[in-house]
Amino acid sequence: MGRYSKETPFVNRLQAYSFLRKGRHSPTGIRQFNTAKLRNPSIADRAVVETTTHLWSFGDRYYNLAAQHYGNPRYWWVIAWWNGLPTEADIKKGQRIHIPLQLEEALRVLEAY
């Protein structure tokens, strides 16, 4: 389940993107997805999803943690979003982050409205 799993693609025909259509040899439009709508998990949301704590150290990367915990590095953004820290540059050495253990449950919480 990816962050675009609930989204339907559309064809972008806006004139502002004509340069992209030329580069992709697509005169009719560019197939795109709408931006996924995610929300920040509340304290109550966080309480129902089991997490593990990770102490950030030099060389850590979200994608490596996602591969280790979820078996897929493409879910790095779940860990980043869950902690409200969009990039590794936002984390300081020795800082604790929380990694949701149940990926499907974390995705459900992040995508709920």
Image (cartoon, rainbow, N blue to C red):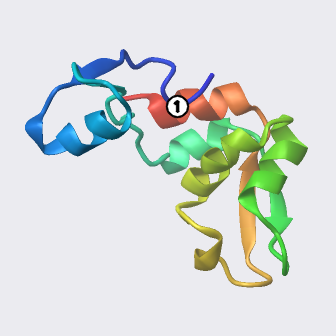
The residue under the point 28% across, 36% down is: 22
The quadrant holding residue 104 is top right
Q: Quadrant of the N terminus?
A: top right
Left or right relative to 78: residue 56? right
Name which residue type carries label 1: Arg
Above-or-below relation of 8 to 2? above
**Quick one: 8 or 82, which is closer to the camera?**
8
Residue 6 in the image: x percent, y percent?
Answer: 45, 17
Pinpoint residue 80: horizontal percent, then vertical percent. Answer: 61, 56
Residue marked by disc 1: 3
- Spot occupied by residue 73 in the image (x, y as percentages of width and height): 77, 44
Q: Is residue 17 left or right of residue 87?
A: left
Residue at screen point 59% across, 27% down: 2
Whether residue 63 appears in this view of the structure is yes
Which residue ends up furthest to the right in the rendered image? 68
Q: Name the residue furthest bottom.
A: 93
How many numbered badges does the structure rendering display? Answer: 1
